[in-house]
Image (cartoon, rainbow, N blue to C red):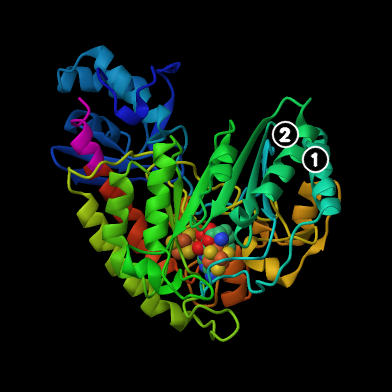
Amino acid sequence: MESSNILHDQPLEFEFNFSSRLYRASTIMDERMGDGWLLYAPDFKGLPILLDDFSHDILNRFNHGAVAGEVLSASVSEAASSFDRTLDTISFLEEHGFLRNQPTKSSYADSAYTSPISSMSIWLHINSDCNLACPYCFVESKQHQVMGDEVQNRVAKAIAHTVREHSLTEVNLKLAGGEPTMDVALMECIRDKVGAELKNLDIRFMTSVLSNGTLVSDRLLDFLKHPMTSIGISVDGFREAHDIHRKFRGSGHGSWSIIEKNIQKLLENQIRPHIMTTTGKETLHTLPELLEWIFELGLSTRVSVVRNPNCSWDYTPLEKATYTAYCDQLEECFERALSRLENSSVPFDLANSLAVCELSFEYPAFSGVTCGIGRNHVVITTAGDVASCPMTVHEGGLPMIDNLLSSCKAAFPYSPMDRASLKGEEDCLECQWYPVCVGGCPVTNLRVNKIPFSKSPFCQFYKYFIPRYIRFLGKKLLQQQPVLS
Ligand SMILES: C[S@@+](CC[C@H](N)C(=O)[O-])C[C@H]1O[C@@H](n2cnc3c(N)ncnc32)[C@H](O)[C@@H]1O
Ligand code: SF4
Ligand code: SF4
């Protein structure tokens, strides 16, 4: 293979075994696109690629399994291709998971929690106060609760203890609330304390602030200019749609015009915020305009959807039927958004611009869990208890112990090994998209299905979105470089 895809431009370091029998992976998505072929292996690391007819023909020669050396010599004599090109193509296909050394199994078996843990993220609920009053917010109590000194000290020590105990190499401290930027002094104090405890440990220590973006003071700018520090700003929809829910407590005014100015202010200060899009029934229709606005600013986003469609876990009858209409709406709005973004004038960084819900396109989620719940995503309340997830902070939690990974496991004592299929419905382990989706968010599933590791109520949307997004990536890839040859 002479040139390589921009996503896969590393030189091949692959030892070729002529006598090995290889099989075309049966899990791959393989479709005609432009003059070439769009290929994606959901169960193998990497994003989609585009192949030319020649490479695609080589791949198909392995449909029922074939010996690499035999395909090589047949192709050289029949297709008059060069030996080197054919060899490189087979190596490339194997290295990127399209060819395997054994037939792919028809069902994905969970291999939960088998990989060693090297990083930990800590969602610190530093306060409960907020200047906005988003009705869907899962932080149900907004009374004045602040993480006190004693809890801050315990948290800092527990982080360092856990790093030592598990030889972790990375800690990501997420300062959340409530609205953390209402108290920058508290943010500074907590980061300093954790930093001091981690000082002599060989660790990558990152801090991110999760904010509604309404309070960008000079003090916050200074905080963000510190190395390894970033900010995420929550946005619901474009302009008026954002203002439907993200209103100031008290005045009831929308917050869009302020956050728009503040995002500019951050950019002028060389701070590039990540946009945390939280979209729902009332705001979804503006997704196309919102995403275009984000990408034109050169920013990245994760689009999450409000999990409780009627804005409250209390009053919503969490029946699957409630989600059917929601999924239809998600499908319609994402279709419009992707069609619009497909325009070649919209800038798009394939690997970083867009993440959607808890779907994992580049790295198969073979832990069987879509996030670090119960494993290495530790959520600590203002009172110093450990909750299973930010969505369950208001339910309290378990008292924190020094080993935060043990606390994390105790707070969510479920295992993906206990995955169950819903009566009369498809088993996620039989689904082509399982490595991307793994059944969705376990907390939502627990609430809706009563089984955390089961089929997501958003399944209908995921089944539409996953292949559609792969096609979208293929089109953007095609705009950025021609098909491989
Ligand atoms: C609870 S807020 C705290 C930080 C900050 N106040 C903010 O708005 O970003 C953290 C994130 O949770 C999201 N969120 C709140 N309630 C949610 C819900 N019911 N479903 C999905 N996301 C939700 C918010 O949109 C925000 O992106
Ligand atoms: S700004 Fe954040 S914490 Fe405040 S109500 Fe909205 S989602 Fe909740
Ligand atoms: S929730 Fe649906 S899309 Fe996701 S793995 Fe299960 S069956 Fe597949």
For residue 405, side relative to residue 247 (left or right):
right
In the picture shown, does residue 111 fall above or below 442? above
* Residue 34 picture location, percent across and down: 14, 41
Answer whether labels 1 and 2 touch (C-beta < 8 Å).
yes
Q: Quadrant for the N terminus, please.
A: top left
- Residue 432 % position (x, y): 42, 55
What's the magenta region? 476-485
Residue type highlighted by circle 1: Thr
**Residue toward you, 432 or 67:** 432
In depth, the one of 417 and 153 nearer the eye is: 153
Q: Secondary structure at mark 2?
A: loop
Residue toward you, 8 or 476: 476
| Quarter of the figure with residue 99 | top left
The structure residue drawn at horizontal position 22% and vertical position 22%, both measured from the top left corner, is 75
Would you name the residue on which mark 2 appears? 168
| First in sequence: mark 1 vs mark 2 | 1
* Position of 259 relative to 228 (above/below): below
In the rendering, which numbered label is found on residue 299?
Answer: none
Image quadrant in which you'd find residue 196 = top right
Which residue is pictured at 37% across the width and 46% down the height?
264
**Above or below, comparing residue 386 to residue 209 in the picture:** below
The residue that label 1 is drawn on is 162
Label 1 neighbourhood size at 10 Å, few (<14), some (14-19), many (20+)? some
Residue ID at (44%, 43%): 266
Amino acid type at circle 2 is Leu
Residue at 53% across / 76% down in the picture? 250
- Tell me which image quadrant ligand 1 sits in: bottom right
**Mark 1 element type:** helix
Q: Label 2 neighbourhood size at 10 Å, few (<14), some (14-19), many (20+)?
A: some
